[in-house]
Each structure stands twice: as structure tokens, then as C-alpha cells.
């Protein structure tokens, strides 16, 4: 069974997600942005979701974590929760 560790920032609008991605590409700290802007309870932990198995998250989120490049910023990824910026820390 595949597992991964990821962190994310969840916001309400695609526009805000794009603005945060730009900040990340300009060197902003992911954890600080998550604490300040994320609407997910994980924001308090810098967006850290810990380790989880494939299938535990919604499909659009899973697809990014288990298929896209590790350590890159991916998004905005739309789910029923809002718009995510996702960074996979590792995958096994």
C-alpha cells in the first residue's frame, strides 16, 4: 500500500491560492503561510497532514500527492473543501 506525507494550504478562492503560490515561488515560508491563511485545522501545524495512505484523501488531492513531483508546489487543486496548494514531502 502506498503512503505519503504532505502538507497543504486550503483557501476559499482560486485567486487567493494563486497569490499564495506566487509568494511561495518568491521564497515565502510554506508553514507560515499555512498558519496565516489556511482554513484547514492542519494550518496550525504549518499545513502538515502527516502520513496517510492512498485513498484516504479526496481523489483530486490523492492524484496530486501520489502522481505529481515530490517537494514541488502544486495547485490550485479544487475539491469540495476549497482550493489547495499541496506539497508532497515524501512518498513510499
Image (cartoon, rainbow, N blue to C red):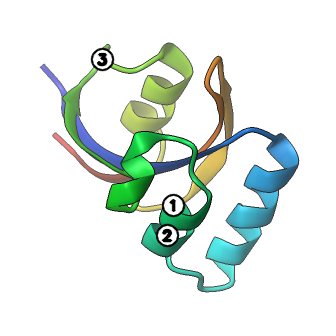
Q: Which residue is mark 3?
A: 56
Q: Which residue is painted at 50% across and 79% down in the image?
A: 29
Quadrant in which residue 57 is drawn: top left
| Residue 40: percent from left, percent from top | 49, 40
Q: Nearer the viewer, residue 21 or 10?
A: 10
Q: Which residue is painted at 62% across and 58% down in the image?
A: 37
Q: Is residue 14 left or right of residue 72?
A: right
**Which one is earlier in the sequence, the residue at label 1 or at label 3?**
1
**Which one is earlier in the sequence, the residue at label 2 or at label 3?**
2
| Residue 15: percent from left, percent from top | 87, 50
Is residue 85 depicted above or below 4 in this figure?
Answer: below
Q: Which residue is painted at 51% across and 61% down in the image?
A: 34
Is there a contact, CB below 8 Å, between mark 2 and mark 3? Answer: no
Is residue 87 depicted above or below 57 in this figure?
Answer: below
Q: Which residue is mark 1?
A: 34
Which is closer to the viewer, label 1 or label 3? Answer: 1
Mark 1–mark 2 distance (CA, rounded to whole Å): 6 Å
| Residue 22: percent from left, percent from top | 75, 70
Q: Is residue 86 visible?
A: no
**Circle 3 sits in a helix, a strand or a loop, which is it?**
loop
Q: Which residue is mark 2?
A: 30
Q: Nearer the viewer, residue 88 or 16?
A: 16
Is there a contact, CB below 8 Å, between mark 1 and mark 2? Answer: yes
Q: Is residue 20 visible?
A: yes
Q: Residue furthest left?
A: 1
Amino acid at each position: 500500500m502506498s503512503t505519503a506525507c504532505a502538507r497543504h494550504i486550503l483557501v476559499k478562492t482560486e485567486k487567493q491560492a494563486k497569490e499564495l503560490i506566487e509568494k511561495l515561488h518568491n521564497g515565502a515560508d510554506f508553514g507560515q503561510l499555512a498558519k496565516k491563511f489556511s482554513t484547514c485545522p492542519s494550518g496550525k501545524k504549518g499545513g502538515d497532514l502527516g502520513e496517510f495512505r492512498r485513498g484516504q484523501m479526496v481523489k483530486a488531492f490523492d492524484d496530486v500527492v501520489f502522481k505529481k513531483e515530490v517537494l514541488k508546489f502544486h495547485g490550485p487543486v479544487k475539491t469540495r473543501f476549497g482550493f489547495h496548494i499541496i506539497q508532497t514531502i515524501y512518498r513510499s
